């Protein structure tokens, strides 16, 4: 997973939609939520550990959902993504990572929902593309069952929601950032088994906790939707989702290029191919990333287009959408020093000023 290589073209927030009762947990929160990603930013403003500095800033802006990494994969483990003012302990499991002081402090904060990009420790995020044995399948299931148990046990009385997801599955399926590459049938079959193992582990573990009011869900993230829609190209949406009953699908929405009409069409296309599962039912598609960099527009244009895209997502009934992001992670020069040295994916600029988009979180 290469967090810094992005094509960022729209912005998003979290908002309310009807939810459905989950058998062993209380009804998911239906109030309006606002959310933002805090992953791999390149600057900081305090001596607080970077994970929690960003969380405190996001909460102060008005976010009630935050998207972070919780991973020990070999590509971009969490300690690499949150380096500032931090001394990460050596841990070998995701539940141990979640139990470090940094994540304990994060999860104790007043957020309703934590969206976590998570991968099995000690492996590349897309290792399954080359080889995925039955032993790997069992290890994935066990890994995410154990993490789910930890989250539900530790946060049993908090009412918090945790969503565990991958990152931009269409790139992972190809093993490349070239959209013209066609994934192999073997890779597609392996991804189906990989996602099913993650889903199975999470579902088995949460079935053990009938009385707590915390919730853990599993999501698959897709990102090349328009290509599949217009050209019939192979994709996670069309070739994987129909075969895996995931709780949710996350749409990393850069391929619709800020067009509200195309954005709405992509959401409908994803929903058409997702298998309906409880508790979200027809509202099982959320926007995992979108944004509009200030290097490509004025702050007012970013605000206006964000509002338009948000209206489409709300009209569709997405349960979540996430603004990319809190602190920019993409420099235009090296080393970056001032605002102009970044692409402008931010709520808070390097000089400490806030984007106009922050007003949508109020």
Image (cartoon, helix red, strand yellow):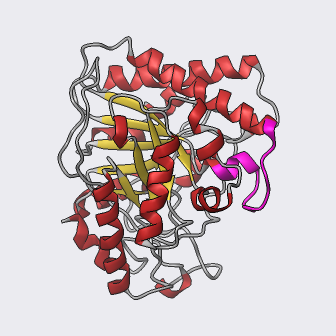
Magenta segment boundaries in residue numbering? 170-185
Q: Looking at the picture, tell me which residue is in the foreground, 350 or 306.
A: 306
Residue 355, horizontal then vertical, whole percent: 33, 77
Q: Looking at the picture, tell me which residue is in the foreground, 200 or 311.
A: 311
Q: Could you say which quadrant of the image residue 314 lies in?
A: bottom left
The answer to whether residue 355 is seen in the rendering is no
Residue sitting at x 22%, y 30%:
158
Residue sitting at x 72%, y 60%:
177
Q: Is residue 267 above or below residue 184?
A: below
Q: Looking at the picture, tell me which residue is in the foreground, 63 or 285.
A: 285
Residue 51, horizontal then vertical, whole percent: 42, 51
In this image, 262 relative to 92: left or right? Answer: left
Main SS, magenta region, reads loop
Residue sitting at x 25%, y 64%:
61
Q: Is residue 275 above or below residue 210?
A: below
Name the image quarter holding the C terminus. bottom left
Q: Looking at the picture, tell me which residue is in the foreground, 10 or 17.
A: 17
Magenta highlight on residue 182: yes
Total of numbered circles in the picture?
0
Magenta highlight on residue 96: no
């Amino acid at each position: 997973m290469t967090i810094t290589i992005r094509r960022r073209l729209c912005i998003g927030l979290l908002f309310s939609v009807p939810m459905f009762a989950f058998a062993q947990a209380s009804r998911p929160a239906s109030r309006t939520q606002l959310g933002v990603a805090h992953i791999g930013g390149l600057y900081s403003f305090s001596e607080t550990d970077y994970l929690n500095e960003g969380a405190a800033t996001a909460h102060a802006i008005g976010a009630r959902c935050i998207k972070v990494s919780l991973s020990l994969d070999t590509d971009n483990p969490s300690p690499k993504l949150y380096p500032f003012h931090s001394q990460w302990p050596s841990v070998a499991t995701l539940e141990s990572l979640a139990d470090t002081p940094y994540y304990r402090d994060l999860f104790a904060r007043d957020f309703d929902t934590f969206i976590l990009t998570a991968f099995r420790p000690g492996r590349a995020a897309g290792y399954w593309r080359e080889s995925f044995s039955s032993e790997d399948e069992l290890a994935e299931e066990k890994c995410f069952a154990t993490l789910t148990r930890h989250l539900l046990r530790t946060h049993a009385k908090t009412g918090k929601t945790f969503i565990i997801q991958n990152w931009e599955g269409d790139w992972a399926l190809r093993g490349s950032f070239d959209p013209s590459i066609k994934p192999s049938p073997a890779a597609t079959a392996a991804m189906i088994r990989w996602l099913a193992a993650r889903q199975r582990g999470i579902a088995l573990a949460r079935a053990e906790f009938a009385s707590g009011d915390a919730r853990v869900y599993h999501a698959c993230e897709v990102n090349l939707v328009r290509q599949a829609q217009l050209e019939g190209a192979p994709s996670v949406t069309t070739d994987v989702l129909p075969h895996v009953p995931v709780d949710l699908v996350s749409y990393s929405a850069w391929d619709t290029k800020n067009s509200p009409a195309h954005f709405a069409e992509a959401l409908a296309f994803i929903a058409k191919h997702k298998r309906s599962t409880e508790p979200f039912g027809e509202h099982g598609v959320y926007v995992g990333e979108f944004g509009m960099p200030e290097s490509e527009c004025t702050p007012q244009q970013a605000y206006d287009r964000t509002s338009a895209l948000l209206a489409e997502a709300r009209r569709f009934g997405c349960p979540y959408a996430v603004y990319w992001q809190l602190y920019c992670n993409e420099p235009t020069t090296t080393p970056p020093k001032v605002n102009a040295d970044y692409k402008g994916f931010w709520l808070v600029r390097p000089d400490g000023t806030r984007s106009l988009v922050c007003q949508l979180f109020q």
